Image (cartoon, helix red, strand yellow):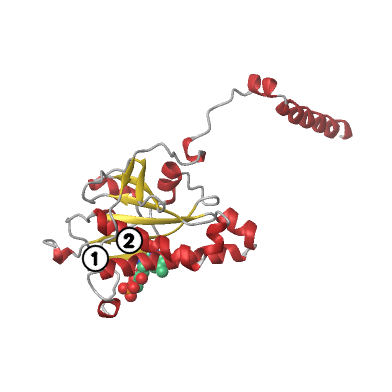
């Protein structure tokens, strides 16, 4: 019995030692390329400059009372100026409310799933706040196939989704378990800032859970820890407002 246990231990140690010798390990188990979803997001995609944010068309006081979650959208596209305003509002909320998190390199990352935005091809983009631009990150299906990206298919009919992600690993390292709560608060604040900006443009939408986890994992390296999806905002024009 003792002998068997010792032999098992030696085999285990032998295996561990062999794993430290790269050539030997490769000979036993050929090295494979890392799967795409574990790589960092491509920063090679083309960049689309956004115009200045569209100025508000209504006072917050005049639209806030009618704020309601809307999940039914007109086919009319958004303009890039409207998208610019929505992204900037979410970004500014985090930058202004949590400047020390930005200084620590832990700013939120914002992505845009664009289906109907004038002058922007359907796809997944990362918002680049310093450049006021979108960097293309990945393709996205459109039409009926887009419904496979979300739990509730009505959200695949929005003109665009703002997807808010944060660095959970970094937040926990910095703040302990409070980092998780803080990150959720920041995601909520950014999502609602985007919503209020949309309302003031007389657009509609709602915050919601976002794309299915595998979608951002495969396309944007969102492993749920170093880049964790936090919240999303679905934006569009009201279905009864198709001529806007
Ligand atoms: C953190 C969070 C996650 C949400 N996720 C979803 C969701 O996945 N699907 C959805 O239809 N609504 C979602 N909602 C939106 C709420 O359902 C919505 O705010 C609620 O229906 C209340 O509607 P009202 O804001 O118009 O009163 C979410 C809201 C929050 C705050």
Residue holding disc 2: 86
Image label count: 2
- Position of 228 with respect to 178 (left or right) is left
Q: Quadrant of residue 103?
A: bottom right
Residue shown at 87%/31% (left/top)? 3
Q: Position of residue 44 (x, y in %)?
A: 41, 36
Does any portion of residue 158 appear in the rendered image?
A: no
**Residue sitting nearer the eye, 138 or 4:** 138
Quarter the C terminus occupies? bottom left
Residue holding disc 1: 203
- Gap between marks 2 and 1 measured at Cα: 10 Å
- Above or below residue 229? Residue 218 is above
Q: Secondary structure at mark 1?
A: loop
Does any portion of residue 27 appear in the rendered image?
A: yes
Quadrant containing ligand 1: bottom left
Quarter the N terminus occupies? top right
Residue shown at 55%/53% (left/top)? 105
Q: Residue furthest left?
A: 243
- Above or below residue 23? Residue 182 is below
Q: Quadrant of residue 145?
A: top left
**Residue sitting nearer the eye, 102 or 109:** 102
Q: Position of residue 188 (x, y in %)?
A: 44, 67
Query: Which is more foreground, mark 2 or mark 1?
Result: 2
Label 2: how many Cα within 10 Å (few below 14, some 14–19, many 20+): many
Q: Position of residue 131 (x, y in %)?
A: 38, 49
């Amino acid at each position: 019995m003792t002998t068997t246990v010792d032999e098992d231990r030696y085999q285990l140690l032998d295996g561990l030692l062999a794993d430290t010798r790269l050539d030997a390990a490769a000979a036993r188990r050929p090295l494979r390329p890392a799967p795409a979803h574990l790589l960092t997001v491509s920063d090679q995609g083309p960049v689309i400059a956004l115009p200045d944010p569209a100025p508000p068309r209504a006072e917050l006081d005049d639209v806030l009372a009618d704020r309601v979650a809307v999940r039914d959208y007109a086919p009319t596209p958004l303009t890039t100026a409207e998208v610019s305003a929505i992204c900037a509002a979410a970004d500014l909320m985090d930058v202004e409310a949590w400047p020390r998190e930005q200084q620590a390199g832990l700013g939120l990352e914002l992505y845009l799933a664009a289906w109907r935005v004038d002058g922007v091809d359907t796809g997944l983009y990362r918002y680049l706040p310093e450049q006021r631009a979108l960097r293309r990150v990945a393709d996205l299906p459109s039409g009926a196939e887009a419904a496979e990206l979300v739990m509730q298919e009505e959200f695949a009919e929005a003109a665009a989704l703002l997807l808010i992600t944060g660095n959970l690993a970094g937040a926990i390292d910095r703040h302990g378990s409070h980092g998780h709560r803080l990150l959720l608060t920041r995601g909520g604040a950014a999502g609602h800032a985007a919503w209020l900006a949309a309302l003031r443009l007389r657009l509609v939408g709602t915050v919601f859970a976002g794309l299915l986890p595998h979608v951002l994992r495969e396309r944007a390296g969102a492993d749920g820890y170093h880049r964790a999806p936090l919240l999303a905002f679905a934006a569009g024009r009201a279905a009864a407002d198709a001529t806007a």
